[in-house]
Amino acid sequence: MQVGEPTLKIKKISDDKYHSVGGFNLQDPPSSLISASLLKDAYDRGLYESILQKREIDEDTRELFRLGTLIHLYILEPDEFDKKYYIGAYDPLETREQVESEIGDLLEGFKKEIELKYPNISDGEGAELAIIGEYDGVFVKSKLDKMVMIDNGYIVITDVKSTRLPMAKVKRDKQGRLWEIAREIDEYHIDLQMAFYAKLAVEAYRQRTGTTYEVICELLFCSKADGKTRLIRLSPEKMEAGNEKLGRIWNDVKEFTQFGIGRVEKALLV
């Protein structure tokens, strides 16, 4: 099969560059650049609220997001962490951002446990890759914590999540399922996010190689509550739930990028 010029590019770019572009563009809808976070927000609050009103984030959630960023860098890109942050007491001569010793200890604990339990996560391969380009007529972007091709021809996508759930004491139901984690995946629409990542990864590799690969999606939960980690592989049922969520919001987002907010509003009112 002849492979043409890909419309989805897999590339390594900095967080700053990645976050500097993107979002819904009311003045020029076709130039909107759609990410998983936008899709999750649009699914959760509705497309119009997501476009017209930036989501307010409480301080506790903001701190959890910051911890997630620190974990990503400390585990997956330690050199980048050292360029941006230092751990310890305030140093007036430092130009990097301070990370408190307590958080530094938490990060080091995560690192040691991951290197012991899941050494392939921190091996540096396929870390922090972006997929950017056009998909289904829409400009999209995604930043994957880790994406690798394994020997049997599967694409494995691993996303690192900070959580308040204590991983050492997470509860199971009568069928042995980790229902607290399942609830968090559903509540924060992580299933939608991973479904979006999987679709972009499959299409990006198909364009590059002419081959359609299967995808395995994993979540590495790092708990702020007890400093423990747990690697979860999403079941086919969870991926299907994510695909259903994605399908419900994707058509609205696509209509907006093609016709603007007025056309979609009328369609929804009918």
Image (cartoon, rainbow, N blue to C red):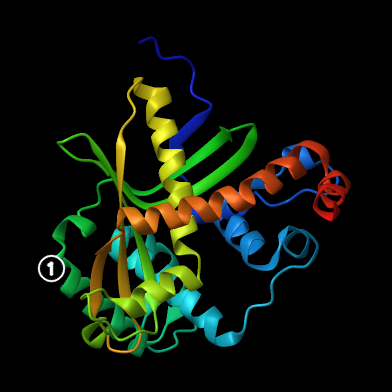
Of the pair 93 and 233, the residue shown nearer to us? 233
Residue 39: x, y in percent?
A: 60, 55
Q: Horizontal and vertical percent for residue 36?
A: 54, 54
Tag 1: amino acid: Lys
Which x, y percent locates residue 261?
84, 49
**Above or below for 23 versus 72:** above
Which of the 4 image quarters holds residue 61? bottom right
Q: Is residue 84 above or below residue 151?
A: below
The residue tagged with tag 1: helix, strand or loop? helix
Q: Would you identify the image quadrant in which residue 115 lies?
A: bottom left
Q: Residue at x 48, y 23 (%)?
A: 6
Question: Residue 23: image x %, image y %?
Answer: 68, 52
Q: Quadrant of residue 78?
A: bottom left
Q: Which residue is mark 1?
A: 117
Which residue is farthest top? 2
Residue 12 visible in the picture = no
